[in-house]
Amino acid sequence: MTAELKTERRAATLVLTLSDPASRNALAPSISSAAIEALNVAESDPEVRCVVLTGDGGHFSSGGNLNRLASNRRADPQVQSQHIELFHQFIEAIRTHPKPVIAAVEGSAAGGGFSLALACDLVVAAEDARFSMAYGRVALSPDGGGSWHLAQALPRSLALQIIMLGDAVSARRLEAFGLVNQVTDAGQALNEALRMAGRLAGCAPNALASAKELVDRARGQTLSTHLGDERNHFVQNLFHANAEEGLQAFFEKRAPQFR
C-alpha cells in the first residue's frame, strides 16, 4: 500500500492521518508534500480552528522507511538531502502554523515520527504509546528537529541518553518531562485530542496565534526585546473585534462567540 495522508473535518478541527499501516506509517516525501498543502489550506480557512495529526492502524509513525533509505544510498546524496529538506518544511509548517496543532499518538512514534510529534504544539498520548529516537540503531543521526526539541526541553545528558541509546520512552515519562500534555487510555488519543481541539475552537484564533508566536520567539530573545513583542501583540489583539466580543461577553456573563 502506498503511503498517503488522509484528511477529515471534525467540526472545527482538521484531522490529518498518516496512513501506511503495513509500515507503521513510515514517513515518505509524498506525506510531507500533502501535509504542507493541507496546512496551507487550513491556515486560510476561517472555519478550521485547530489541526490534529495522528496515525492509522494503532501507531503514530515509525519514522523513515528503511527500504527507501537503503535505496537512496545507491543514488546521489542530493536525493536524500531533498527528501529531508521536504520533511523539514513539513516540520516548519507545523511550527509556524497560526492555529494549534495537536499530535494524537498511539503505539509507536519512532525516529522521524518522534520528531514529528515533538514539533506539534500539544501532544496527547495513549498510556501504552512509546517514543524512540531510533536513529542510532541504524547508524544515523536525528532529523526533523528531534535533537533541537529535546535539547531545548531537557538537560543535555538526558537528551543525549534518549538520542544515543534510542531506548523507548513511555508516554508517562515524557509527560513528567513536559513533552506530553495528556496521557489517556489506549485507543483514546484521537478522541482526547479532539476534545482538546474543541476547547481551543472556543478561543479567539488571533489570541492563540499570538501565544504561539510569542512562545516560539521567546527562546532566542532577551526579556527586554520580548516585552516589546508582548506589548505589540497585546495592543493589536485589544483592538481586534474578538476583544470587543470577549469583553462584552464577560460583562454580560455569557459565552463569547469568537471569529
Image (cartoon, rainbow, N blue to C red):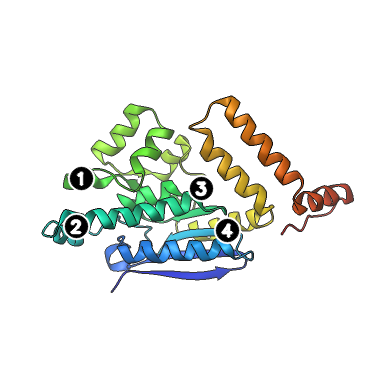
Which residue is at the front of the view, 143 or 11? Answer: 143
Badge 2, how many Cα within 10 Å: few under 14, some, many 20+? few
Residue 210 lies, in percent from the top left, at: 62, 45
At label 4, the amino acid type is: Cys
Q: Earlier in the sequence, mark 3 or mark 1?
A: 3
At label 2, the amino acid type is: Leu
97 shown above or below 165:
below
In the rendered image, which residue does mark 2 sit on?
69
Residue 51 lies, in percent from the top left, at: 53, 59
Q: Earlier in the sequence, mark 2 or mark 4?
A: 4
Instruction: Give the residue at the far bottom of this rendering.
Output: 1
In the rendered image, which residue does mark 1 sit on?
140
Residues at marks 1 and 4, CA–CA distance in whole angstroms: 34 Å
Q: Are marks 1 and 2 in contact (CB under 8 Å)?
A: yes
Query: Image quadrant of residue 26?
Result: bottom left
At label 3, the amino acid type is: Asp
- Residue at 14% across, 61% down: 71
Q: Are marks 2 and 4 in contact (CB under 8 Å)?
A: no
In the rendered image, which residue does mark 3 sit on?
121
- Quarter holding the C terminus is bottom right
Q: Earlier in the sequence, mark 4 or mark 3?
A: 4
In the rendered image, which residue does mark 4 sit on?
50
